[in-house]
């Protein structure tokens, strides 16, 4: 290991055998943490070549068990988002795309900092289980076509170990390490194709489109090097996606969208863009656009919502909470924020709204904190909307007035109102196909 | 700590407060090893500014106790060598310079790889103790003027911790870390001045004079930033220094030199050059050259050898082993290597000779191995000497014939004999004053 650290320190490229050694050692715990972390920092400072990233990803995917989905005949696809605020798209996307005839084994994570996590949102539904073993995942994929679960110790264990160390050693952002972490988990899912949602803006990892695009290219190129069909969409994360931020609130968002509500236009646009590509890559539509149209039909017919109910039921969740939003958790205290003057909402900063949600109790600053599933924000106005003075901009939900006060402190600085309408901005910024 | 790692990863400079935090955390064990090692690798990749190196050194020196030598009126000086083969100069230098009226608190290390360590050589003398507490060091400095001891857990504990991690994470060679490690220990010794012996050549850390000079400049500049008078000599380490390589053998070398033997001309030259500077910096001679002459007189008069006897006795060593070399440990098996043809010895590779000594049992590859104090080589010929065919070049000592065979394998490739005399090369290559 010492020689491998020295090689990377001096900017040399590792061989496939060396990368397999490192991934196996990380999974088995046979190399001490201080050596792994020195190596991670050397990678962070010196980078990796494309072939190295491909081999590291492959080695990490092979470090534990892999889902074996050969028994399922339909194409297997997944989506991965780099994380944003109000980005509960997976909740609507998995059942929607499954209804189109694809299989969606969706491994998701938890929220940390100002971005939420799909697993946390799912657990806002009473009874719903996300800790599923490979033996529990397969029958659900067979019957429902989609299953949403957390990373287990058996799938890509090298990634779990390296991710923990990266988090503790300021080596999170290194592009080859980000790419290998994301793709190793997807590779362990036995996918045919993958669609990536790389967020750009104040609420995203990258505020800068150029850096987001670099990561997207690296992800797409590495995935192809691994024989995985892959497309990346760069999408806007300047303001939160949709009308809801919070765990139970984003379940409500997904329900409303699949029930045909079209008020959350930006959410719907990203949903149909990602889903359209998945349907196209899965061979169920001639083009991504055709795929999007097919999905719109599945929403209109009510079949997509019905699939969401089946998905939730198959994982033990209480479907009455979907049918009646009043049964979902909602925090006791609430506060409406009124527009201080009339005009156009010209800014609604995603990061600050996300931080407000954390302070309201919807998120966590460290992995040890517990969540208030009923906390969050309902955004009555989005950027470009006209507001009258005193009209409600947003409603904040939290356990008590102290939480509301903390949330308001952040939200108060999150918006601007101007006399002139802001220029319309696209939601899907770029497609790397 | 996470922020400090990220700062260094991005090439930012640390503040003095931040460096004090890191040094204290390393000494106290309050930051996990994997974070320290990620930081060490970031330093290795991004470097440090001179003010950062100065502050890190100061912080490491302050991380534990410091010797308090104010009660001793004479100037306190020490020498540090970057390590070579046959470089047992400290053994002769400490008593010699003490005899000139200086106080020499000499903290030394153990050998690893092809270079020897002063502590190992001292322990070849029966009974001699090098694990001394500050309370044991002070009276010996008062009575003998010199004391040779190992790094204790109380002096510069941050360095002990960081050195162990550097050794295990391929971050040994980073110039600011090397400089801080060397100088923090010297600063904790409460010195007035320091003379550095930076070796250049096959047996040294640096084979290349340019890189050795860079390190020397960094050491001298940082020492001055700390208010410590400091001079560095670049000296040759192409061939071993002197006529003996091995632990007890290098004790014999020091004894012979202080008894007035002038056969080991290169050893004597380096000894007098380093000692001359120490005497000059300590205010006992107008120039380094005057200092060297003063020391030559102390050797001729026998006073220097008498001081060595007092030093050894004060640390519990058996002085009869000094007076009678036959009492020193000597390995049972021996082998003389004869010149395969006549001519001039044109090469005697220090690294290969050092590796031969390790294989004979005089050194260790890992810190866990034990030593054979009586093993090593007696070099009958040095570079430039004329040899007849069949004349002995060197005698190898080891525990058994297996050891001799291993040592011979290395030694056989260590020398060349040519028809023409090689050009004479200087021993002291450069002085950075």
Image (cartoon, coloured by chain):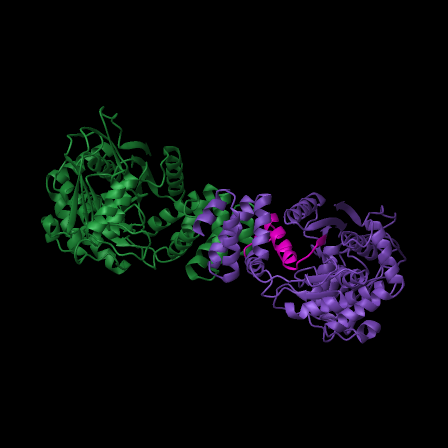
Chain colours: A green, B purple
Residue B156 % position (x, y) = 59, 60
- Which one is nearer the viewer's eye here, B110 or A67? B110
Specify the quadrant of the image occupied by residue A194: top left
Confirm whether the magenta stretch covers residue B190.
Answer: yes
Measuring 84% from the left and 54% from the top, which residue is drawn there? B292
Left or right placement of residue B110 versus residue A9 in this view: right
Residue A396 % position (x, y) = 19, 44
Q: Is residue B353 above or below residue A86?
A: below
Left or right placement of residue B19 versus residue A108 in this view: right
Any part of residue A262 in sight: yes
Any part of residue B202 in sight: no
Part of the protein shown in magenta: B169-195
Residue B91 % position (x, y) = 76, 63
Q: Is residue A368 above or below residue A91?
A: below
Q: Is residue A432 above or below residue A35?
A: above
Quadrant location of the C terminus of chain A? Answer: top left
Confirm whether the magenta stretch covers residue A382.
Answer: no
Residue A210 % position (x, y) = 39, 33
Left or right placement of residue B70 versus residue A88 in this view: right
């Amino acid at each position: 290991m010492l020689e491998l650290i020295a090689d990377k320190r001096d900017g040399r490229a590792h061989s496939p055998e060396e990368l397999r050694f490192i991934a196996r050692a990380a999974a088995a715990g046979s190399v001490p943490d201080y050596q792994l972390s020195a190596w991670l920092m050397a990678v962070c400072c010196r980078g990796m070549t494309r072939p190295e990233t491909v081999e590291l990803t492959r080695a990490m995917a092979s470090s534990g068990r892999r889902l074996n989905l050969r028994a399922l005949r339909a194409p297997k696809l997944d989506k991965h988002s780099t994380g944003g605020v109000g980005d509960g798209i997976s909740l609507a996307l998995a059942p929607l795309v499954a209804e189109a005839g694809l299989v969606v084994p969706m491994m998701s994570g938890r929220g940390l900092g100002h971005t939420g996590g799909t697993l946390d949102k799912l657990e806002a539904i009473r009874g719903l289980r996300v800790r599923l073993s490979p033996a529990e995942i397969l029958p659900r994929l067979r019957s429902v076509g989609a299953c949403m679960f957390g990373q287990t110790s058996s799938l890509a264990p090298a990634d779990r170990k390296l991710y923990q160390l990266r988090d503790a050693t300021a080596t999170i952002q290194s592009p080859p390490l980000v790419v290998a972490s994301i793709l190793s988990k997807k590779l362990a899912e036995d996918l045919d194709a993958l669609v990536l949602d790389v967020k750009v803006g104040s609420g995203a990892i990258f505020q800068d489109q150029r850096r987001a695009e670099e990561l997207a290219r690296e992800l797409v190129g590495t995935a192809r090097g691994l024989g995985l069909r892959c497309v990346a969409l760069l999408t806007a994360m300047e303001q939160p996606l949709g009308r809801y931020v919070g765990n139970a609130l984003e379940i409500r968002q997904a329900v409303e969208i699949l029930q045909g509500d079209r008020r959350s236009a930006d959410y719907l646009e990203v949903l149909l863009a990602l889903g359209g590509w998945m349907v196209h890559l899965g061979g169920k539509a001639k083009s991504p656009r055709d795929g999007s149209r097919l999905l719109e039909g599945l929403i209109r017919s009510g079949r997509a919502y019905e699939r969401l109910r089946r998905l939730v039921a198959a994982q033990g969740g209480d479907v009455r909470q979907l049918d009646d939003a009043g049964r979902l958790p909602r925090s006791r205290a609430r506060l409406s924020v009124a527009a201080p003057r009339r005009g156009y909402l010209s800014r609604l900063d995603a990061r600050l709204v996300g931080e407000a949600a954390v302070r309201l109790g919807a998120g966590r600053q460290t992995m040890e904190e517990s969540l208030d599933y009923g906390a969050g924000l309902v955004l009555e106005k989005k950027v470009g909307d006209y507001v009258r003075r005193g009209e409600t901009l947003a409603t904040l939900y939290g356990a008590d007035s102290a939480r509301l006060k903390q949330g308001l402190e952040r939200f108060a600085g999150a918006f601007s109102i101007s006399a002139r309408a802001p220029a319309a901005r696209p939601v899907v910024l770029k497609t790397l196909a």
